[in-house]
């Protein structure tokens, strides 16, 4: 027997309202106007990223924050 929906509980959204695509190293290089090699150097020196199956990805918001922190 199925349960009836509780009218007092709000329905959970089926998917997030905003999902931002993680950027590839080549995309980060394009944004920064540098080479892929330079992006890997920046990743090694603190540019925040995540690693999926050996591939580095950068969240656009983290990249923006990093740029703001390192702009002089």
Image: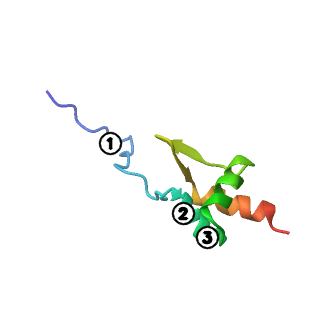
Q: Secondary structure at mark 3?
A: helix
| Nearest to N terminus: mark 2 or mark 3 | 2
| Nearest to N terminus: mark 1 or mark 3 | 1
Residue 31, given in percent of the width and then of the height, sits at 61, 70
Horizontal side of residue 25 vs 1, given as left or right: right
Is residue 15 placed above or below 2 in the rendered structure?
below
Is residue 14 placed above or below 20 in the rendered structure?
above
Q: In the picture, which quadrant includes the C terminus?
A: bottom right
Residue 54, given in percent of the width and then of the height, sits at 50, 42
Residue farthest right in this picture = 72
The residue indicated by pointer 1 is 7
Q: Who is closer to the viewer here, 36 or 14?
A: 36
| Nearest to N terminus: mark 2 or mark 1 | 1
Look at discs 2 and 1 and give the one toward the viewer: 2
Q: Who is closer to the viewer here, 2 or 27?
A: 27
Look at discs 1 and 3 and give the one toward the viewer: 3
The residue indicated by pointer 2 is 26
Q: CA distance from mark 2 to mark 1?
A: 48 Å
- On residue 35, the disc is none
Residue farthest top in this picture = 1
- On residue 31, the disc is 3
Residue farthest left in this picture = 1
């Amino acid at each position: 027997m199925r349960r009836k929906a509780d009218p007092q509980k709000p329905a959970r959204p089926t998917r997030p309202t905003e999902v931002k695509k993680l950027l590839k190293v080549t995309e980060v290089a394009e944004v920064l106007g540098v080479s892929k090699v330079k992006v890997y150097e920046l990743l090694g020196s603190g540019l925040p990223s995540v690693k999926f199956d050996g591939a580095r990805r950068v969240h656009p918001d983290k990249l923006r924050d990093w740029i703001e922190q390192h702009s002089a």
